[in-house]
Structure formats: C-alpha cells, structure tokens
Amino acid sequence: MKITIIGTGYVGLVTGACLAELGNDVFCLDVDQRKIDLLNNGGIPIHEPGLEEVVARNRAAGRLQFSTDVAASVAHGQLQFIAVGTPPDEDGSADLQYVLAAARNIGRHMDGYKVIVDKSTVPVGTADRVAAALREELRARGEESMEFAVVSNPEFLKEGAAVEDFMRPDRIVIGHDDSPAGQRARDLMKLLYAPFNRNHERVYWMDVRSAEFTKYAANAMLATRISFMNELANLADQVGADIEAVRHGIGSDPRIGHSFLYAGAGYGGSCFPKDVQALERTARQYDQELLILRAVEAVNDRQKQVLGRKVVQRFGADLTGMKFAVWGLAFKPNTDDMREAPSRVLIQELIERGATVAVHDPVAMDEAKRVLALDLGEAQLARVDFKTAPMDTLTGAEALVIVTEWKAFRSPDFEQIKARLKQPVIIDGRNLFEPPLMTGLGIEYHGIGRSVLTGK
C-alpha cells in the first residue's frame, strides 16, 4: 500500500519505518528541512533502540523516503497519517494547530478519495475539526463532492520499546464512522493491519470519538497507577513499611497486576503529563471535574521533588560548596527524551541551593545540555559537569543520586563508588538496589519507600 506519514517525530518516524518494514511504500513528510536532510543522510533525530536499522534497511530497499514536498506527499498515499506534535497549550489543552495545518494541506492538494488517519494524540472531537478543515479547503477549490474519511488510530508506543511495540502490538484501536466513505476507510485500514492479525484479531473497531478517548483513558490510568504508588511509598517511609514488599503483595492480585506499580521520582516524557492535562481540560469544557486526575498531576509534581527533599534531609538546606553525582537524565531508560524529566527538577534545586553537580546519562547528554541551558541559564549551567563515564561523576561528591533506571546502573562496582565519594551515600530514586546489601557493603542507602530496611 502507498502511505504518507505527516511528521517525522517520535510517532511518525516509528510508524513510517515499521509500516515500510511490512512492505508498504511510505512517504514521510516534515516541514523541518534539517530533519529531512539528517534522515536522508542516514541519521536519526531521536534515540530509539532498533529504529536506525529499520530506517536504513527500508531506505535502501526504496520503501521509505523523506521529503518536505507537501504536494508530493498528498499525491503519494491514499492513506494520509497525521503524526505531528500536539504540545500542551497555556491552559493545558492540546494545541491542534499542526494537526489542522496538515489537514488543510491535504485538502488543498488531494485529487481523489483519501483516508486521513489521526495518529497524533488528540482530544475527543478532533476528527470533526479535521474533517471541517478539509471541507473548507475543498469548498475553496470548488471540489465539495470529493470524498474522504477521517479515522482515529491512536498509538500505544512506549519510548525505548517503540519498534517492538509497533511490530508486536497488544491491540490496534481504529475509530471510523458508518458512512460509505467511512466503511471504505475501514476496508483499507483492515488491509493495512492484516499482517498483525495472522494469529489472532488485534484490532478493536469503534466509533471515532471512542477511539480518541481510549488513548487518553489509557495514559491517564497508567499515570494514576504511578502516582498512587508514589504516594504510598512516601507514606511507607513514614510508617516503616517496604514499598517493594507491598508492590509484590498487591501485584500478585490478577485484578491489579504488576505493571506500573514501581515507586520512584515521578513520571515525565511527552505523553503522560500533557495527556493528563489535556483530558482535564476536555472535562472542564463539558463542565465536568476529574478530581482523581487532578490529584494524579499534583502528586506527580510533588514526587519530582522527592530526591531534592532527601538530599536536604541528609545534608541540610544550604548546599554551598557541596558536589553531588547524578546518574540518569532522560525521563526513562532507552531514550534521550528530557521532556518533563525528574532530573531537571532535582538539578535545578541543587544548583539553587549552592551545589555543583556532575552528571551522566548513556544517551541523553546532548539533549540534557540543551534543555538544562534553558532551565538554568548559561551562568548556572557552568556548575553542571557533564561526564562521559558514570564513575567519573563520583570523585569528591557528597553522594550519588540515581534518577533514571538504566540497566548500566544496576550492577556497579560498589567498592569503587565508596572509594570515590567523600562519604558512602546513595540516594536511589528508582529503588535499583536492595537495602540489606547496601548496609552490608557499608553504604548509607536512601530509597523510595524503603526506610523500614535502612532505619532512615
């Protein structure tokens, strides 16, 4: 099938590359010439395991192309996937300007039936706005009778595992209407996703608004589980319980399960924060109040400060002249995404309290330099020392603070950590280590919700 992907960001690039991997002829459009040049020269603008190889393989096979040519992109694919960004607006709602601009471009250039697939995460009712934008452009051309359909096909990709998630989906949600054009769109989408249904049916068909809602509901539920466990972990620290034991105890209940029950330093990234806000904003538009989601957001904002609080509790409010080592900058492992990352909150607080910071992340160093320059300003950024090796951050530091649970951090040389730190203190924002082991090694250990085992 001939497919156009509008937007070569995280969702668009993964979607385009993986659909090409299945044998489709994919045209990826982006307005950013630098990004297109990078892709055409064999580069990748994001870090995602396995993606570079898929892109290279399909470019070489002629199944994947990148361009800024809007007219050519519309002419190419009968299926037009809109996968542009929907950043949060000032009021927390999703900014749809890029989605609607893409729709208008399709309307200006289409010369026959098209299926417009909303792949971006968009609020309920966006498909109606996309359809209205298309009709307006067709009307201006005197082509009111030209048929099209707008379909909702939200993505459920995890950063760091997106290629695997796309190629082995647990579900594919598709929303369409019952008009003749909508039924024709269903047939085309069924053909597109047929390779995923050889073993069993993975597609969930529904109306468009329900499909749009499903994406927000899924992310809101996962964010709720994270904030719930973080709030319990903070209480566990006070009452003398071990949140890891609690996690195993409740996760064994099949009604609850084990996923997204890990206590930590709060969630970040491009999805959960903005999607929770957008869903709350949608509710307010309909005079509804989502009290649980408001609490989820508040708990997460507070949880991002938990590592700073633990540093202050241990070393005092004035950190002037002190140095701290920070392992992990990206909001989660296997990505260089720094959006809403807890590390940004921690580093800013340490710098404001007078400390210097030595940091390391396996892949997010360049992106971290860019965003921390915005957070701190150039003068304060000079107090952040970016190290190419994790152990190099430790020399002369008061403590090691772990923010991101990269696999490379799970089995370090603890004797070397003790030797390099001024004092053997680890503040672990992801509960990577077992407190009894740390005690046996002579390390003062502060986890999240694990004070019963450390006496702290």
Image: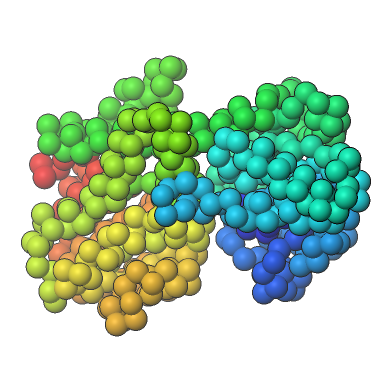
The quarter of the picture where residue 394 lies is bottom left
| 369 over 74 or under it: above or below | below
Q: Is residue 453 visible?
A: no
Q: Residue 366 versus residue 34: which sits nearer the camera?
A: 34
Residue shown at 55% from the left, 44% from the top: 158
| 103 over 281 or under it: above or below | below
Q: Is residue 66 visible?
A: yes
The way the protein has been coloured in the rendering is rainbow
Q: Residue 440 versus residue 61: which sits nearer the camera?
A: 61
Q: Position of residue 410 (x, y in %)?
A: 38, 51
The quarter of the picture where residue 233 lies is top left
Residue shown at 68% from the left, 25% from the top: 207
Q: For the C terminus, which image quadrant? A: top left
| 245 over 38 or under it: above or below | above
The quarter of the picture where residue 299 lies is top left
Could you tell whether 419 is left or right of 159 in the image?
left
Q: Position of residue 329 (x, y in %)?
A: 39, 61
Circle count:
0
Residue shown at 34% from the left, 27% from the top: 248
Q: For the N terminus, which image quadrant? A: top right
Q: Residue 37 versus residue 407: which sits nearer the camera?
A: 37
Q: Residue 19 versus residue 290: which sits nearer the camera?
A: 290
Q: Position of residue 222 (x, y in %)?
A: 44, 34
Could you tell whether 178 is left or right of 451 in the image?
right
Q: Position of residue 255 (x, y in %)?
A: 43, 17
Residue shown at 59% from the left, 62% from the top: 46
